[in-house]
Image (spheres, rainbow, N blue to C red):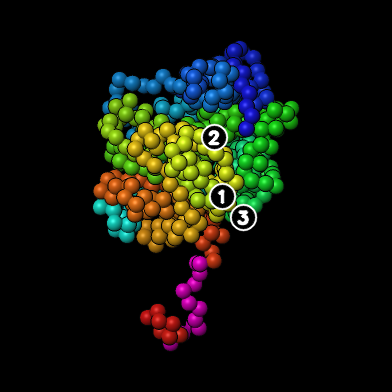
Amino acid sequence: MAVQAVESSNASSDSTDSSGSSGSSGSSVSLGPAVALSCRECGERFPLGPIFACVECFGPLEVAYDLPTGDPEGLRRRIEAGPNNIWRYAPLLPVPADVADKPNINPGFTKLVKADNLARELGVTGELHIKDDSGNPTHSFKDRVVAQAVEAARAFGFTTLSCSSTGNLAGAVGAAAARAGLRSCTFIPHDLEQGKVVMAAIYGGDLVAIEGTYDDVNRFCSELIGDPAGEGWGFVNVNLRPYYAEGSKTLAYEICEQLGWRLPDQLVIPIASGSQLTKIDKGLKELIELGLVEDKPYKIFGAQAEGCSPVSTAFKAGHDVVRPQKPNTIAKSLAIGNPADGPYVLDIARRTGGAVEDVNDEQIVDAIKLLARTEGIFAETAGGVTLGVARKLLENGVLDPTLTTVVLNTGDGLKTLDAVAPTSGPTAVIRPSLDAFREAGLA
């Protein structure tokens, strides 16, 4: 996507942001410990505002903080006394101090399930946990990032919330906008799973299906962002992206808190744009720097579907450049052929001693069923990808079965019923009699 950015300079006036739409310059807003935006490539800093790319090198911007250092025990107590959602971590996020009092969908603090049955099935002797984010308000992790984006949209004066989406994000934006009293207009590929389409539409905003892939949708949105028709629009994954992406850090925070304030040894994380994986790594590093967890090595493994595996392909080939692919997989929530954070995922996997792997559609379905019958968790196809990759890495001797491992399930299987419906149904159809029950071999 072509991007253009300008630095915000006047605290009291409106300015044109990097998307071409108007909003508050951001210099006067209060977003908690957030102090600036920093270029991930060259380090150039910009005032807080609705910009997403560096004017010096066009690198991506991310939030820079003045975090509360010096009293880890006090900070830990403050977090533990907070609400049972992501706002317990407000001291570490780009949100106003009164965020918990505002109308928001309040996602987070989802279950970390100790998966002993699954561990026995896979031959894992260490701790195996599933971070099950299907328990969020719209049943995917996207509620975390959108909740962050809503606070930035409020701060910068946007009136419409928008996104390009593979389904889950559109639903999260629709729900969050409805709760916040904002208009929503979201854009999706025309061939998404029906469950995701219905869930995105039910919240009353405008839902627009584009003929093409997610990357086609993204290109269309880049044109809209630069057009007067996009005036006053906050695109959560474009001009609000630096703030939006920080929501994924809360997965890292929760996992470590739920493990008793300790780092897992290994994490298996799905890759769509790659932002979730990079922000989980950022969150883990912040916890170490703040003294909230003991500093020790951890490994991060990325998971992709074989039918859309540009990052996995690059990792296996030893490349630093991620070549785009045309998606062809049942895991449509991960079907981003040109992932923006792909190169950073490669860096993290290599730095931590992890890897990036992929599985085919049959392995995805098998993993969904395995998790359901062992732990009672019905994962969407993205969860099938992460568990399928975890199983493959265990079989190949890459994932250590003796260590504490966390596998992410980022969405609810009810959204992707088509993937498992052909092979899931009644065990038997019988007459309403005990004889028929016995004849079916069920007694």
Q: Earlier in the sequence, mark 1 or mark 2?
A: 1
Mark on residue 332? Answer: 1
Q: Earlier in the sequence, mark 3 or mark 1?
A: 3
Residue in front for this viewpoint, 54 or 174: 54
Q: Is residue 194 above or below residue 166?
A: below
Residue in front for this viewpoint, 161 or 8: 8
Residue 62 position in % (x across, y down) = 50, 25
| Segment colored magenta | 423-435
Q: Cβ–Cβ below 8 Å for labels 3 and 2?
A: no
Spatial separation of the CA atoms under disc 1 and disc 2 = 17 Å
Q: Is residue 72 above or below residue 12?
A: below
Residue 223 position in % (x across, y down) = 70, 32
Residue at 50%, 69% in the rendered image: 425
Image quarter of the N terminus: top right
Residue in front for this viewpoint, 359 or 17: 359
* Main SS, magenta residues: loop
Q: Which mark lies nearer to you, 3 or 2?
A: 2
| Residue occupied by mark 2 | 340
Mark on residue 26? Answer: none
Q: Which mark lies nearer to you, 1 or 2?
A: 2
Query: Does the image show residue 19?
Result: yes
Q: Cβ–Cβ below 8 Å for labels 3 and 1?
A: no
Q: Earlier in the sequence, mark 3 or mark 2?
A: 3
* Secondary element at image label 2: loop
In the rendered structure, the answer to whether residue 84 lies left or right of residue 429 reads: left
Please check the rendered image and state whether residue 190 is part of the magenta-colored stretch, yes or no. Answer: no
Residue in front for this viewpoint, 283 or 23: 283
In the rendered structure, the answer to whether residue 221 lies left or right of residue 99 reads: right
| Residue occupied by mark 3 | 194
Spatial separation of the CA atoms under disc 3 and disc 2 = 26 Å
Q: Amino acid at mark 2?
A: Ala
